Image (cartoon, rainbow, N blue to C red):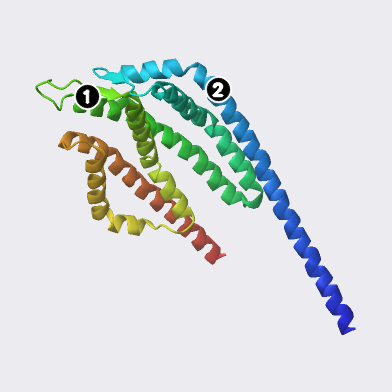
Amino acid sequence: MKISKIIQINKKNSADDELVKMSLVEHLSEFRKRLIVVAVCFFISTIASFYFSQEFVDRLVLLGKGYTFIYISPSELFMQYINLSVIAGIVITSPVILFELWKFLCPGLLLKEKAIMCFAFLSGFAFFLIGAAFAYFIMVPFLLQYFLKVDTTQTIKPMISFANYVSFITSSLLTFGLIFEMPIISMVLSNLGFLKPQWLVKSRKAVIVAIFVIAAILTPPDIISQIMVAIPMLLLYELSVIVCKFLYLRRKKKRQKLDQE
C-alpha cells in the first residue's frame, strides 16, 4: 500500500511538473507572437518614416535657426536619416508595444491590477509626450539660442555636426519625457504600498535642493534656464504628493469600511 501511494504521488508530481512546463512554453510562445507583431509594426513604421525623413531634418534645421550644420564623414548624414526614421518608428509603434504588453500581462492580473496597469500605461504615455513636447517647443529652442549667444563678439561661427545636434535633441526629449513620468511612477508605487505621502512631505526640502541641482546639470550656468527646468519638476513633485495623498486616503477609507463590516 505504501509503495503504491508513493508511486501515485510521484506520478501526480510529474504530471504537475508537465503542466508547469507546458504553461511556461505557452507563455514563451505567446510572448514570441506578440514580439513578432511589435517587430513587424516597427519595421513597417521605420520604412514609412524614412520616406518622410527629409521633412524631419528640415524641421530640426528650422528649430536650430542661426546654426550652420555640417557632416564630417561621408555616411554621417545618411546615418542620421536612418536614426531619425528609427526614432519615428519607435514613437509610432509605442501604442502597439503598450497594447501587446498589456495583452501579455492581462491574464495574470486581478481586476484592480488591470485597472491600475491600464491607467499607468495610458497616462504614462500621455505624460511622456507632454514632457517631450515641453522640451521640443520650449526648452530646446531656449537652450539653442542661449548657446548661440555665448560668444558675444560673434568671432566664432556656430558650425556643429548634424549628428551631435540630433543627439542633443533626442537626449533632451528623452530626459524631459522621463521627468514628466514622476506622477505616474508615484501613483504606481503608492498603489503598491511602497510609497507614502508622509515620506514625500518630510523629504520636500531635500527634493527641492536635488531638483535645482539636477536643473543646474541639465541647463547652462544661468539662473533663468535653471528656473525654467526646475519649475516643471517642482510642479510634478507636488502633483505626485497630491496623488499619493488621494490614494492613501482612499485605501484608508476602504480599510475602515472592512473593519466595520
Image quadrant in which the C terminus is located = bottom right
Residue 240: x and y, percent? Answer: 37, 47
Mark 2 surroundings: few (<14), some (14-19) or many (≥20) residues within 10 A: some
Picture layout, residue 137 above or below residue 214: above
Please provide percent x and percent y for residue 30: 69, 44
> Which residue is painted at 81% across and 69% down in the image?
12
Q: Position of residue 63 (x, y in %)?
A: 31, 20
**Extreme residue toward the left, this view:** 153
Residue type at numbered disc 2: Ile
Residue that label 1 marks: 145
Mark 1, secondary structure of its residue = helix
Dot 2 corresponds to which residue? 47
Q: Quadrant of the N terminus?
A: bottom right
Q: Secondary structure under badge 2?
A: helix
Disc on res. 56:
none
The kind of residue tagged 1 is Gln
Point out residue 90 in the picture as x, y percentages from the top left corner. 50, 31
Eye-nearest disc, 1 or 2:
2
Q: Quadrant of residue 104?
A: top right
Q: Viewer-proximal residue, 84 or 251?
A: 84
Image side of residue 217 versus residue 197, left or right: left
Whole-Å distance between the Cαs marked 1 and 2?
33 Å
- Residue found at x 30% / y 42%: 233
Q: Observer-nearest residue: 145 or 224? A: 145
Q: Is residue 28 left or right of residue 244?
A: right
- Residue at 40% across, 42% down: 181
Name the foreground residue: 192 vs 213.
213
Q: Is residue 260 left or right of residue 14?
A: left
